[in-house]
Image: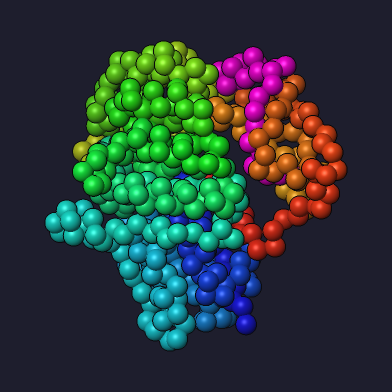
Amino acid sequence: MTKKLYIETVGCQMNVLDSELVVASLRKEGYELTDNTRDADTILFNTCSVRQHAEDKIYSALGRLKNAKQSNPKKIIGVLGCMAQKDQRLIFERAPYVDLIVGPGQLHQVPQLIKEISAGGEPRLEVSLGRKDGSRSDIEESHESFDPLRDPEMRPTPYQAYVRIMIGCDKFCTYCIVPSVRGPEQSRPPSQILTEARQLAGEGCKEIVLLGQTVNSYQHTENGRRWRLSDLIYALHELAGIERIKFVTNYPKDMTDDLLAAVAELPKCSKYLHVPVQSGSNRMLERMKRGYTVEDYREMMDRIRDRVPDFAVTSDFIVGFCGETEGDFQLTCELVREQRFKNSFIFKYSERPGTRGADLFPDDVPEEVKKRRNNELLAIQNAISEADNQPFLGREVDVLVEGPSKASVKQQEADAQQVQLTGRTMCDRIVVFDGNRRQIGQTLPVTIYDANAHTLFGTVVTQHVGPELFSLEPISKPPNRVNILKNFIPK
Ligand code: 5AD
Ligand code: SF4
């Protein structure tokens, strides 16, 4: 009999990829996905610890499962990922009916652990060593990356894939929990990455997104050759079938000229860079221990502007960090006005126990002030995003079609042939247009007729081809395709 798996994912792209791999490993064991917890034999939460709010959501979801577990003690409940690594046994204390706590470095063990628990075994806790609990090499080893060669049927979409090129982080920004929960920075060998990408290309994947907490800090020496991110991109660019290459998230200090040259020169390389600045105030950047000044960041933006035509840069900001005054915040607003990011992700500071920030500085900006600053900065950014999307009106852009738009999925149109589709331009702008399911995975010219802050609306000029070239067979949703994003809750 098939077993049913419910999985909910919170957080960043790393977590989305981790969930994809966990789902794939469990499908090999005969699991099928369900989107409700009632039917599920196993319920997994892949968690995030970056902000308190993301953790609260998981604890309340766990709270709601207490009765379900009481009425069916055979149901297995697991907590995976960053919060599992951070809170460890505390999760058992807060939700004693949890069976499984597995850190991001132990996810490959999930199928075996579930088997053992189902066979009557004790609840299990499997996590990595803490950053102070051993030698660097022991700690590195305990954060095992989970990147088996993937089964194409298990990927959420056949045309796009995340490829992890590094794990962990060594930057230790004072507000951030990531270096403790994801462990030391470790770059994967280029040969492994290229093998994975070659296989993806062979399976029809057109876009790969390289993932790392500080992806542009990538470096690895293999057979005496030192590889940087730019070297990796040049090698990936050679792969037939791959049409687009993106990479996230960038660290401002590591945005080197060789990387900008690769982005500018290589036609398959998306002209989109996510480079979080976090604040426009040097005093805040210093307290955050970001390792650069606003002037350094401006200089980097100037280099991007000089070298990369039609680029788009997005950023992250933390408002209300410890000691942030109105003056500091106004400097951030100024930077946003001046740099005109394509988009900004704005977060209210959330104190993370165990970080240097929590030890050193009181979380002294009141919640209402954080909220107000968040809204103010968002309003500035939205006005810029909307204004900067207007020049696209009347222009034709190349869109790699990703799938039905959110609106058409909501209206349950996803299985119809004629649907509203969504895709992205080379500079990562979202484009929505009416089309046909068979266009998913194609790169199409779309003429833009409307634009708001976050979306361009367009029409596609369909090229009619002779019947001998055009298969009339409907291309329907592959029966086994896994929709792990169904239960994805953004942070
Ligand atoms: N509070 C609020 N935002 C945070 N981020 C990281 N740590 C915190 C925190 N403690 C934000 C940063 C980072 C993004 C992924 O999350 O802006 O770039
Ligand atoms: Fe966190 Fe800073 Fe590392 Fe980014 S660079 S993951 S913000 S510590």
Relative placement, left or right, of 181 versus 387 is left
Q: Closest to the observer: 97 or 123?
A: 123
Q: Is residue 52 visible?
A: no
Q: Residue at the spot x=30%, y=46% of the render?
A: 187
Q: Residue at the spot x=47%, y=27% of the render?
A: 266
Relative placement, left or right, of 433 versus 118 is right
The chosen color scheme is rainbow
Q: Closest to the observer: 222 or 217?
A: 222
Residue 275 percent location from the top left of the image = 40, 29
List the single residue furthest toward the left. Answer: 135
Asked if the magenta segment contains residue 403, the reply would be: yes
- Count of picture labels: 0
Q: Residue at the spot x=62%, y=57% of the render?
A: 483
Q: Residue at the spot x=50%, y=23% of the render?
A: 312
Task: Give the residues drawn in magenta, as a range.
Answer: 383-408
Residue 152 location, quadrant:
bottom right
Residue 374, compared with residue 57, is above or below; it is above
Residue 263 percent location from the top left of the image = 44, 26
Residue 469 location, quadrant:
top right
Q: Is residue 76 visible?
A: yes
Asked if the magenta segment contains residue 44, the reply would be: no
Q: Quadrant of the N terminus?
A: bottom right
Residue 457, compared with residue 206, is above or below; it is above
Q: Closest to the observer: 7 or 268?
A: 268
Relative placement, left or right, of 371 versus 431 is left
Q: Closest to the observer: 336 or 71?
A: 336
List the single residue furthest toward the front. Answer: 468
Residue 165 percent location from the top left of the image = 37, 46
Residue 419, compared with residue 73, is above or below; it is above
Residue 381 percent location from the top left of the image = 53, 22
